[in-house]
């Protein structure tokens, strides 16, 4: 199903037979909504978000490529999130029930424009498959192909804004004892000491070499997000907290309490592709009632 969004950029929606849904916007190739089968929104979007290209929308899951943050010559987090993607007509669209499949999907594509090539002179194809399972699990699979004559390197992140009830009641499990690069002190390297990550101030860290599965526990909502990743060694954790929130025009002063960014990412070490090579990076998100997740 293709619908038009508030500013005319195309959106594609998938709805599961049980009522879960996901919406993907061609502006940025960004997932802008993910709802469970009770209709509850699981991703945060700011009430001050600006839905107009060339800005990325503050919320959902923007794609950071080919740069993460401001470490490089490109705009912050690279250009992919600011561009208009297209539907990938060559990819077969999966539907519920086809070949006993329990997922439906949409495939979108980004190729560099002449302008992109001026600031990043590498020919690539970035394909993103967004799927929603019958159970309402969301998966994002990105494939980046080098269609250039020379190798190139890039960083990548699924900049995932999770919706939480109250940030002070949230904890992340699975990152304990890992090393992290602290974006708040010029990416200095530290080692995590706590049992689980909790939040009482601004956090902006790249946890390096993290496990394939981590959990984000939201006590008040009695909900746990399970984050599974492949091909993406790092996890970025970001909450702007009070002071930084006030400096962002597209973010409410108190909204830091209702969001947490947990990004499956490749940041510490760039990924290099030789001509003709392809890389795949996968993110799977499930939102489960906390009582059922003691085994994670
Ligand atoms: C996070 C970065 O991933 O994104 C932060 O670690 C940054 O440093 C944040 O502030 C938001 O970035 P932007 O460009 O969307 O405002």
Image (tube, rainbow, N blue to C red):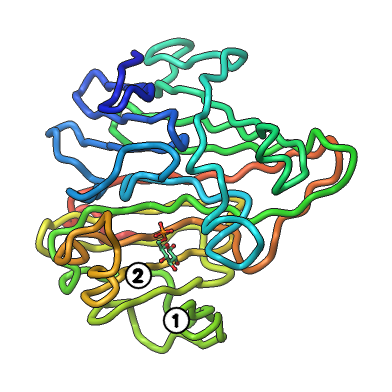
Q: Report which quarter residue 100 is drawn in.
A: top left
Location of mark 1 (residue): 184
Q: Report which quarter residue 184 is drawn in.
A: bottom left
The picture places residue 207, in percent across and down from the top left corner, at: 50, 72
Q: Nearer the viewer, residue 14 or 82?
A: 82
Q: Quick one: label 1, few (<14), some, or many (20+) residues within 10 Å?
A: few
- Quarter in which the C terminus is drawn: bottom left
Q: Is residue 102 visible?
A: no
Q: Contact, CB < 8 Å: mark 2 with mark 1?
A: no
The picture places residue 97, in percent across and down from the top left corner, at: 39, 12
Vertical side of 62 occupied by 24: above or below: above
What numbered label is drawn on residue 173? 2
Vertical side of 227 occupied by 206: above or below: below
Quadrant assignment for ligand 1: bottom left
User: Measuring 51% from the left and 79% from the top, which residue is drawn there?
Assistant: 180
User: Measuring 32% from the left and 50% from the top, which residue is drawn there?
Assistant: 58
Tell which residue pokes out farthest to the top in this image: 98
Q: Helix, strand or loop at disc 1?
A: helix
């Amino acid at each position: 199903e293709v619908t038009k969004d508030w500013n005319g950029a195309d959106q594609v929606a998938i709805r599961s037979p049980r009522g879960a849904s996901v919406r993907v916007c061609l502006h940025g190739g960004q997932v802008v909504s993910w709802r469970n089968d009770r209709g509850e929104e699981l991703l945060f979007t700011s009430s001050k978000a600006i839905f107009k290209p060339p800005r990325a929308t503050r919320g959902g899951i923007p794609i950071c490529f080919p740069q993460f943050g401001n470490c490089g010559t490109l705009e912050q987090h690279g250009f992919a999130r600011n561009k208009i993607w297209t539907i990938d007509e060559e990819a077969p669209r999966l539907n519920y029930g086809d070949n006993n499949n329990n997922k439906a999907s949409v495939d979108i594509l980004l190729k560099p424009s002449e302008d992109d090539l001026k600031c990043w002179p590498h020919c690539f194809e970035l394909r993103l498959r967004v799927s929603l399972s019958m159970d309402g699990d969301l998966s994002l699979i990105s494939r980046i192909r080098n269609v250039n004559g020379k190798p190139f390197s890039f960083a990548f992140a699924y900049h995932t804004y999770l919706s939480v009830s109250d940030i002070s009641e949230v904890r992340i499990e699975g990152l304990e004892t890992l090393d992290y690069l602290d974006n708040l002190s010029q990416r200095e390297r530290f080692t995590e000491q706590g049992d689980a990550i909790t939040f009482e101030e601004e956090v902006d860290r790249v946890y390096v070499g993290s496990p394939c599965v981590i959990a984000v526990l939201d006590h008040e909502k009695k909900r746990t997000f399970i984050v599974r990743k492949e091909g993406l060694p790092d996890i970025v954790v970001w909450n702007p907290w009070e002071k930084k929130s006030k400096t962002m025009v597209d973010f409410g002063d108190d909204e830091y309490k209702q969001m947490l960014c947990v990004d499956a990412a490749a940041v510490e070490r760039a990924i290099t592709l030789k001509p003709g090579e392809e890389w795949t990076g996968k993110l799977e998100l499930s939102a489960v009632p906390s009582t059922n997740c003691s085994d994670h």
